[in-house]
Image: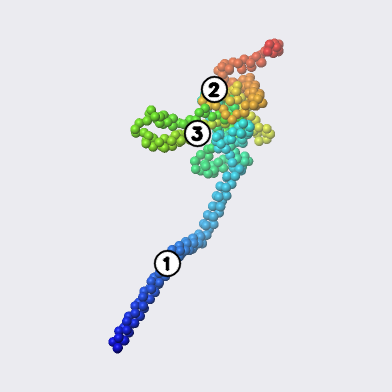
């Protein structure tokens, strides 16, 4: 009996020891788990430490933080303001809507530079910069400062970018001549050097007859089935050919847009106190700096491969254009009569005998000769 009691007691003691050992192991596991931080706690601590570091950095550099905040707000405000209608302007001829040409609307601009003509009879080309509503009220100094400080000028290094190419309607470049006054093209260049404010009246858009694809045409020819060979990559990858054709078409469209010219009249004020603007063609023809043409949209060897689009074809418009060209013809007669500009050159007067003979007749003919000519019609 005593042995049985001893055996039972030993068993109970072993059970208690095992239970105690198990409880201790469980407690150790719980303590280990409690010591391992969770992911949420780790992220929270990292965010908190980052916020504290950021706050400390701001406190240590309070002045720099204030200037940085002010600069950021200023830049954002300037960017937002620049995208408002107050600063809107057309940057190329392709940007101008067709309705403005059809309606013969006017744009405010500044004359920036002219294109030198190396041959007589070429269109007179100049470049203007369309002015935004804010740009219209700026004087020359403020305008030049604004163009130099513009973000586009800072990136490209060219403050005279984004110009509109203009062809002066009804005029062509004069022949080369010797004159004691303004030389060929000098008068218009002086206006451009002064960044003269002008008003451009849109009459039509001169564009190439067909899209130019540049070097893409030669590449497209090699894409024909008769020219393909086994080494042609497009045979293996047909989608590459489609991509190349798409790129060529896009390149051709971009080149066509760059070649567009706005045909129109330019008006300017020679004096600040002048109420009504002067047509720029008037002094050009009146003082022998340009040749008057018989058509508003000149057609010559220099304009081959181009066509006029977005032009008004109404009868009233045609009548006004005819009267305008007739007035330019009378101004050219006055220039020949006064021997201004190119009309002071003897060689040019010999080549243009039609106008010179009329000048001599009106100067030397008697009243009876003029009357008899009028009767004969």
Residue at horizontal 68 percent and vertical 11 percent from the top: 376
Q: Position of residue 206 (x, y in %)?
A: 55, 29
- At numbered mark 2, what does the secondary structure look like: helix, strand or loop? loop
- In this orientation, does residue 283 appear? no
Residue 240 vs 359, above or below: the answer is below
Which quarter of the rendered picture does the N terminus lie within? Answer: bottom left
Query: Which callout, 1 or 2, points at the residue further toward the start of the chain?
Result: 1
Near mark 1 (Cα within 10 A), the count class, few <14, some 14-19 or many ≥20, is few
Asked if 330 appears above or below 91 in the picture, the reply is above
Residue located beneath label 1 in the image: 37
> Does dot 1 land on a helix, a strand or a loop?
loop
Marker disc for residue 300 = 2
Please name which of the two marks, 3 or 2, marks the residue nearer to the observer: 3
What is the spatial separation of the Cα atoms under label 1 and label 2, in whole angstroms? 86 Å
Q: Residue at x 66, y 26 (%)?
A: 316
Instruction: Tell which circle, 3 or 1, labels the residue nearer the N-terminal end.
Output: 1
Residue at the (64%, 17%) spot, across then down: 359
Residue that label 3 marks? 253
Q: Report which quarter residue 362 is drawn in.
A: top right
Mark 3 is surrounded, within 10 Å at the Cα level, by few (under 14), some (14 to 19) or many (20 or more) other residues, namely: some
């Amino acid at each position: 009996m005593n042995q049985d009691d001893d055996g039972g007691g030993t068993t109970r003691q072993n059970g208690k020891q095992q239970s105690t050992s198990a409880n201790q192991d469980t407690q150790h596991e719980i303590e280990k788990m409690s010591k391992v931080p969770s992911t949420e706690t780790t992220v929270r601590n990292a965010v908190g430490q980052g916020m504290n570091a950021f706050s400390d950095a701001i406190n240590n550099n309070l002045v720099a933080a204030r200037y940085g905040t002010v600069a950021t707000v200023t830049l954002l405000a300037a960017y937002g303001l620049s995208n408002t209608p107050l600063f809107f302007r057309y940057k190329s001829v392709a940007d101008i809507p067709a309705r403005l040409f059809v309606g013969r609307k006017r744009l405010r601009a500044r004359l920036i530079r002219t294109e030198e003509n190396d041959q007589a009879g070429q269109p007179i080309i100049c470049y203007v910069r369309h002015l935004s509503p804010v740009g219209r009220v700026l004087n020359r100094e403020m305008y030049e400062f604004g163009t130099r400080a513009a973000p586009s000028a800072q990136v490209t290094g060219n403050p005279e970018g984004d110009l509109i190419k203009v062809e002066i309607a009804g005029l062509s470049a004069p022949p080369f001549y010797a004159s004691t006054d303004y030389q060929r093209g000098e008068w218009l260049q002086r206006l451009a050097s002064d960044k003269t404010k002008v008003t451009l009246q849109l009459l039509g858009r001169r564009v190439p007859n067909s899209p130019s694809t540049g070097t893409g045409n030669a590449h497209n020819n090699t894409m024909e089935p008769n020219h393909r060979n086994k080494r042609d990559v497009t045979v293996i990858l047909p989608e590459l050919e489609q991509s190349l054709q798409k790129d060529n078409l896009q390149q051709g469209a971009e080149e066509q847009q760059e070649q567009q010219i706005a045909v129109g009249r330019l008006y300017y004020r020679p004096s600040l106190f002048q109420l009504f603007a002067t047509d720029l063609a008037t002094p050009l023809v009146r003082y022998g700096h340009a040749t008057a043409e018989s058509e508003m949209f000149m057609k010559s060897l220099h304009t081959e491969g181009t066509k006029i689009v977005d032009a008004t074809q109404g009868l009233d418009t045609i009548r006004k254009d005819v009267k305008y060209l007739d007035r330019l013809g009378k101004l050219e007669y006055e220039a020949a009569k006064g021997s201004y500009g190119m009309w002071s050159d003897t060689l040019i007067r010999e080549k243009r005998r039609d106008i010179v003979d009329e000048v001599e007749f009106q100067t030397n003919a008697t009243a009876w000769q003029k009357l008899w000519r009028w009767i004969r019609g």
